[in-house]
Amino acid sequence: MPRSVNHVASRERRKKIMKMAKGYYGRRKNVWTVAKNAVEKALTYQYRDRKARKRNFRSLWIMRINAGARMHGISYSQLINKLKQANIQLNRKVLADLSMNHPDAFKAVIDQVK
């Protein structure tokens, strides 16, 4: 009995990886073993950095809120504490946007918690 190899599925798997490697430099784009390693590494970085992006944005928002709050004589931690006590539920993303793009609205929020 002849050996059964599923060429259709294996070729499809390779084509999928090679398509993902399109645009890579040198042999990483057209040699199967090199491309497979490069794509696996890239997918690992992609997964890791989706998590890191969330951390980076949160720290950026905190810096922006802190800078805006200090212009009005209050620190970031005091502002967040007073927002919680006043039961004002604005998240850091919105507060950072107010601080950067709508300083009058941000000042109104600060005046409300002082």
Image (tube, grey):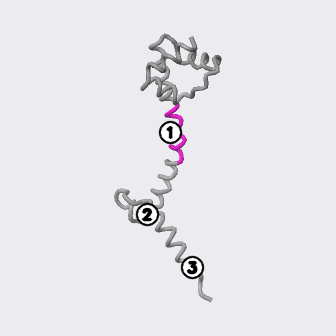
* Residue 58 versus residue 88 in the image, above or below: below
Q: Say which amino acid is labelled 1.
A: Arg
- Who comes first in sequence, dot 2 or dot 3? 3
Q: Position of residue 47 (x, y in %)?
A: 53, 48
Quarter of the picture holding the N terminus: bottom right
Please state the extent of the stretch shown in magenta in the rendering.
47-58
* Residue 48 versus residue 57 in the image, above or below: below
- Who comes first in sequence, dot 1 or dot 3? 3
- Who comes first in sequence, dot 2 or dot 1? 2
* Residue 1 versus residue 72 in the image, above or below: below
Of badges 1 and 3, nearer the viewer stands 1
Quarter of the picture holding the C terminus: top right
The residue at which mark 2 appears reads as 19
Q: Say which amino acid is labelled 3.
A: Val
The residue at which mark 1 appears reads as 53
Count of marks overlaid on the render: 3
